[in-house]
Image (tube, rainbow, N blue to C red):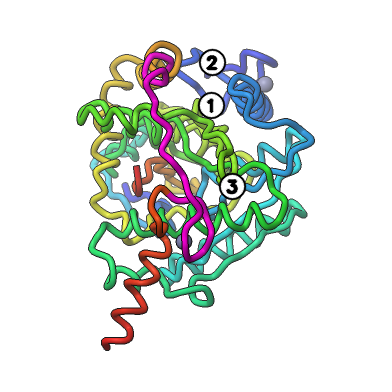
Amino acid sequence: MEIKVRYRGEDKVLTFEKDKVKAKDILKALGLSKDYAFVVKNGEIVEENEPITQNDEVRVVNAISGGLL
Amino acid sequence: MRKCIKCGEKAQVYLPQHRLSLCKQHYLEWFDNRVEKTIKEFKMFNRKDKVLVAVSGGKDSLSLWKSLINLGYDADGFYINLGIGEYSQKSYELAKSFSEKVGKTLHVVSLYKEMVPIPEMRKYDSRPACSVCGTVKRYYMNKFAKENGYKIIATGHNLDDEAAVLFSNTLNWSVEYLKRQYPVLPEEDGFIRKVKPLCKISEKESAMYAVLSGIDYIEEECPFSEGATSIDYKMFLAQLEEKSPGTKLRFYSEFLRKMYPILKQSEEKPKLQPCKICGEPSTNEICAFCNLKMKISQKEAKA
Ligand SMILES: [Zn+2]
Ligand SMILES: [Zn+2]
């Protein structure tokens, strides 16, 4: 299954082997941890076990930023 | 399904270190309350003070500004156009449109006008771009605040920033830095008071607040921050945090509570004098900013 996500100002297409995808699978596919990243589905922040389908509008937010210490 | 602990509606946010599930409305309320508590705890400022928020267009500075407005503080924004190509252009537009949305003033200083943009400046200074950028930002912010009657400069540094700095300073035993790692730097000899009201808000909490408040912020990283060591420290602390929620907050707040008072006793205040060229406070005869400016004009003369 392919899911379109918006991540750091860009559109990405993620491909999954399975048909039932959860929010945590999306974070994993992008190499992110729930400690600093989260999934926004149709405008709502969702928990890691939330199912995601191809019809959902998905945005992934990575809160970590670099720069000067 | 998780339910909001306050109202029983569906929760959008779960905060493991506080063991709290909250709906959108109650999360925004929780965040504002936490900012208010931090302001009070460290006696940062009150509702009579004119506050200048250092705005980058990112989630932290815009969330901070929004929260201060919600809490009824008198807060305007200050943006420095660093001239870093598309990144600066976009972050400026986002900061500007936010200020229009909330109906507050955004003061803007442009490096194109004042000196040279950061990418240009890197040719004249061998330090990492972030250090050069820091010198320039601190200088203009302090000068602007003073000349325009702002008593306080508020920056969007969050818990993850502070914990990463603390970790780095501890690994290196940078005692002189540790002595100054406090969320309030008092006003003195020409320096405006500087505060960090988000110091107990994690980076993720700040991003969730921005998203749930409908704030459009710049998600891209500054192109010069790539490979910054702060990210490594943050990732490492994130691993600890995942195993044991609350580690970062404990590390930082217990430092402030137990270690900072001990270190502070031996703090020797650096002697400040007005810079010979610009008059801003400095530890040397000529301040870091004027030094940088001189390097630029010397090299330009040679070229
Ligand atoms: Zn609620
Ligand atoms: Zn100077």
User: From mark 2 to mark 1, how far is it between C-alphas?
Assistant: 8 Å
For mark 1, what is the residue? Answer: B13
Label 2 chain ID: B
Cβ of disc 1 within 8 Å of ligand 1?
no
Q: Are marks 2 and 1 in contact (CB under 8 Å)?
A: yes
Q: Chain of mark 3?
A: B
Q: Callout 1: few (<14), some (14-19), or many (20+) C-alpha neighbours within 10 Å?
A: many
Mark 3 is surrounded, within 10 Å at the Cα level, by few (under 14), some (14 to 19) or many (20 or more) other residues, namely many
The chain letter for the residue carrying disc 1 is B
Q: Amino acid at mark 3?
A: Leu
Q: Can you say which quadrant of the picture contains the C terminus of chain B?
A: bottom left
Residue appearing at x 37%, y 41% in the figure: A64
Same chain shared by disc 2 and disc 1: yes
Task: Mark 1 vs mark 3: tell me if same chain.
Answer: yes
Q: Nearer the viewer, residue B15 or A60?
A: B15
Viewer-side residue, B110 vs B290: B290
Residue extending farthest left: B172
Provide residue B24's location: percent of width, then percent of height. 63, 30
> Where does residue B136 sit, x and y in percent of width and height?
44, 60
Q: Which mark is residue B239?
A: none
Q: Which residue lies under the disc numbered 2?
A: B20
Q: Is residue B296 visible?
A: yes
Residue shown at 62%/18% (left/top)? B4
Which span of residues is magenta-colored?
Answer: B261-282
User: SS for tag 3?
Assistant: helix
- Position of residue B36 measured from the top left corner of the image (x, y, whole percent): 66, 26
Per the model, the C-alpha gap separating discs 1 and 3 is 20 Å
Specify which label sits upstream in the sequence, 3 or 2.
Answer: 2
Magenta stretch containing residue B285, yes or no? no
Label 2 residue near ligand 1, CB within 8 Å: no
The label on residue B62 is 3
